[in-house]
Amino acid sequence: MAPMKLEIITAERVVYSDEVDVVVAPGVEGELGILPHHAPLMTVLLPGEITIRKGGEQTYLAVSGGFLEMMANTVTILADAAERSDEIDEVRVQEAMKRAQERVAMRSSDMDLERAVNSIRRSQARLKVVQRRRSRPSPPPGQTQP
Ligand code: ATP
């Protein structure tokens, strides 16, 4: 099947731009799989994982939420934040998760629960994508992992 265009953009940068075969994204109404020439659609994204398939290869990104639009065989994702698996700093995620969990545990009256829970969800999404990096098979001897 002829591919479709995928653009993942944040306010700061273009995170991903390429022709792809399949996009799976965390829509508010559940996991959303999009193939080329999918009917036009627009949806809100939750924090989670984006899976991209292109020529037999899978790429994983963490997304913090945003919008997805499918139109004219182009998927555009406007993300609050998005990182490819190799861009995620694992120590930073663990620290962000710990801070948010501590805020929730303290239950102080000035704590913004929704903000803390969202931070935990962003961290969970990043950790899931970091796991993917770890579970990739090792390259044959003499070759480095891209
Ligand atoms: P932190 O408290 O560590 O900033 P956060 O969840 O509040 O975490 P965001 O507000 O979602 O961070 O993101 C701010 C910017 O930092 C975005 O550009 C995002 O891509 C980047 N970012 C956040 N966490 C990480 C991480 N663990 N590794 C790489 N980039 C990250």
Image: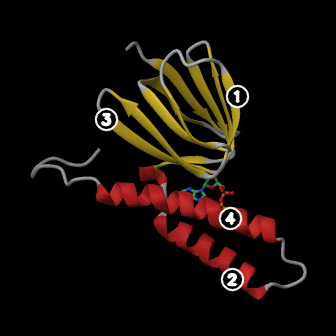
Q: Which quarter is ligand 1 in?
A: bottom right
Q: Nearer the viewer, residue 80 or 106?
A: 106
Task: Please give the label number shown on residue 42.
Answer: 1
* Relative height, residue 98 to residue 83 (above, below): below
How many residues crowd around disc 1 within 10 Å: few (fewer than 14), some, or many (20 or more)?
A: some
**Pointer 3 residue Cβ closer than 8 Å to ligand 1:** no
Q: Amino acid at mark 2?
A: Glu
Look at the numbered disc 1 and give the secondary structure of its residue: strand
Q: Amino acid at mark 3?
A: Glu
Look at the numbered disc 2 and give the secondary structure of its residue: helix
**Pointer 1 residue Cβ closer than 8 Å to ligand 1:** no
**Pointer 4 residue Cβ closer than 8 Å to ligand 1:** yes
Q: Nearer the viewer, mark 2 or mark 1?
A: 1
Look at the numbered disc 4 and give the secondary structure of its residue: helix
Q: Amino acid at mark 1?
A: Met
Q: Which residue is mark 4?
A: 119
| Residue closest to the far left | 141
Give whichever of discs 4 and 3 has the lower sequence position: 3
Q: Nearer the viewer, mark 1 or mark 4?
A: 1
